[in-house]
Amino acid sequence: MRTLLYASRVALKRARIPVARGYTLDDRVLSNAYSSTSRRLLSTSLSSFEDEQHDDRSVVIPATLASLTSKKGATASHRETKISKKEMREEETKRWRLSDVPISDILEAKHSNRWVNPTISSTATLKEAIEIILEGELSAAMVVDETKHVVGLVTSRDLLRCISMGIKDGDSSDELLDRVVGDHVMTPISQVIYARPEETVGSCRTIMAKLGIKCLPVLSKEGRVEGLVTARDMSQYRFSAEDKGGKKSYLNDVSERVGMGSNTSMADPPAFMQAHLALEQTALFINVGVAELPHPFKTENGVGMNHRDFGPSEFSADPSFSEDAFFTKTVRLPDEKLNKIQEVTYCGIADGVGSWRAYGVDPREFSHALMKECENVLQEASNSALEREMKGEKNRRSIRPGEVLANAYDRVVEQNITGSSTACVALFDSIRHQLHFSNLGDSGIIILRHIDSDVAGALKRNRKTPRAERKSDLQAVFVSQQQLHSFNHPFQLGWTGEELEKEEKTSFSSAKSACTTSVHLRRGDVIIMATDGLFDNVDIDEIAAVTLEWERQNGFLRGGDIDGRENRWTLGNSLTDCSYERVPNLAEMLVKKARNNSLDPTTDSPFALLAKDNDIMWSGGMPDDCTVIAMHVVGRSPLARAGKLSGL
């Protein structure tokens, strides 16, 4: 704070404005006399003062800053002036905010400076797309068909990803550059996130930060893409050509920070990361446990609306009634970097759509067939890789989760199995400590990790409970995106038994529409993959609480001592075998928690809260099938599991 005030005074001196005690500057003088750099520094200073206040009491600030916010003609008679928080808020509302600027203004300013047609033909090659992106200085472009209708979006990141995939597939440079944008590179139009012209910079920045995207097409009410805006466009809007060029700008902003010395080196990793980085050099493993419960009012013949309609005195517990399906499979597949066959573990989960029952279709058949075919696809890929290795032929790479899902779906369609389902398939990479997955619909994945509250970082910590009263900081470091057309209408794979005409619309999605991403893992992480039966009834904090209870019951964490756990790992006491035996208990604890919450009419579940947000009256829980796959990341393969895999 002291540095900001000092910098503000320096900026005013450079502008040749006196800053003696009691000097008054009105808005007109302020806007015409001192530099944009000084305005930004003073704005930050005032904001910092406001952030430090937690009530409506007056605050004391230097006279120089006080005079800038006083009424025209007023003077500061003392070194320090009292300004109430209310007055500071009033001044803040007058101050121009970039976050309040409509995105249409950003686009207009961008186009007035330079117009580049941000489109690429769907038939263009990768080479042509790269040339268009570079020559146009674009971050992204819309992909259009021969009728000029938009069919997708391609970003510079997509182009790099396509090049990486081609290298892994063993393509020659000519084969790689000849890949067609519409077939291999673009994000399909069904997945493109867009902004409206009237939306503000603040709301667009929030969307981009949450989804990890760098640009947004701006879609008008008439259905036309008016252009694309990037984070760079937003940040440059506030600066004029004079702000960005000339001697003054260079001296103020560049001269003291351009060029690094020849002895420049990288800093060592933070101390709190040393233990984790030491573990990065060794492979990780996962122990997997599965539990499932059907809808509490479900029988072989259907589902009751309530306990009275259900009939039996005990709630349903037969997993064969469930429309959920899952698989877990460890296979041997090639690793493109290590150039050898490695053990990899895949998991999948699917939630069949129960409304098919009204059409005389058993909704269990589609979801169960989909997961079974995922297993078949993986087993065949593993067999093929082993055969190629025995023949001395080169293997290319392991099969991605999205490919597994797409191939399995095609096989289900070939079998003419009617129905639909959400789906999620994940791959655990033990060498690179990553979880790769593709998720379609409202099933999903969360990753729980212990974060030391005393360590500053990007993650939000629990600030509601005092540090001394917190037992642990186990929290979700990742929550997968769920995809819905509208409330309670998730994306889903499906088949009606016949092909639709091209112009016919369908609510079904393809595997290409799945949200596909990768997440870095650490030893001790807990991964929860589940259908919406869990997430609709148990919020993230409750899932973390159940997981923490499981850890303590089995001695994985004693007294919330994270350092003690890492010391235990260093000594070789990993409790891996205990984890292998007990991780199914965690899955069981979670499905039971979901069952209990779904039957509780007194507490609004996550489903009920979201329903009310969408103007739908719902209270209590949401009874449903529930399947949970719990995965515990450990430092070595358990002996029991090693024995089972010896026959693979």
Image (tube, rainbow, N blue to C red):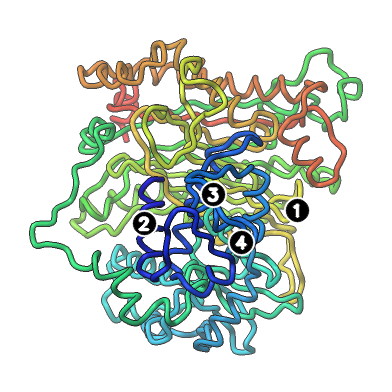
Residue 164: image x %, image y %?
A: 32, 65
Q: Which is nearer the N-term, disc 4 or disc 3? A: 3
> In the displayed structure, would residue 520 be above or below residue 160?
above
Q: Nearer the viewer, residue 267 or 226?
A: 267
Q: Quadrant of the N terminus?
A: top left
**Residue at the (44%, 79%) spot, across then down:** 138
**Which residue type does callout 4 highlight?**
Arg
Give the alpha-carbon distance from disc 4 to disc 2, as whole Å: 20 Å
Residue 349: image x %, image y %?
A: 57, 40
Please tell me whether mark 1 or mark 3 is closer to you in this view. Answer: 3
Q: Residue under circle 1?
A: 486
Q: Residue under circle 2?
A: 7
Give the alpha-carbon distance from disc 4 to disc 1, as whole Å: 38 Å
**Which residue type does callout 2 highlight?**
Ala
Q: Residue under circle 3?
A: 77
Give the alpha-carbon distance from disc 4 to disc 3, as whole Å: 25 Å
Q: Residue under circle 4?
A: 95
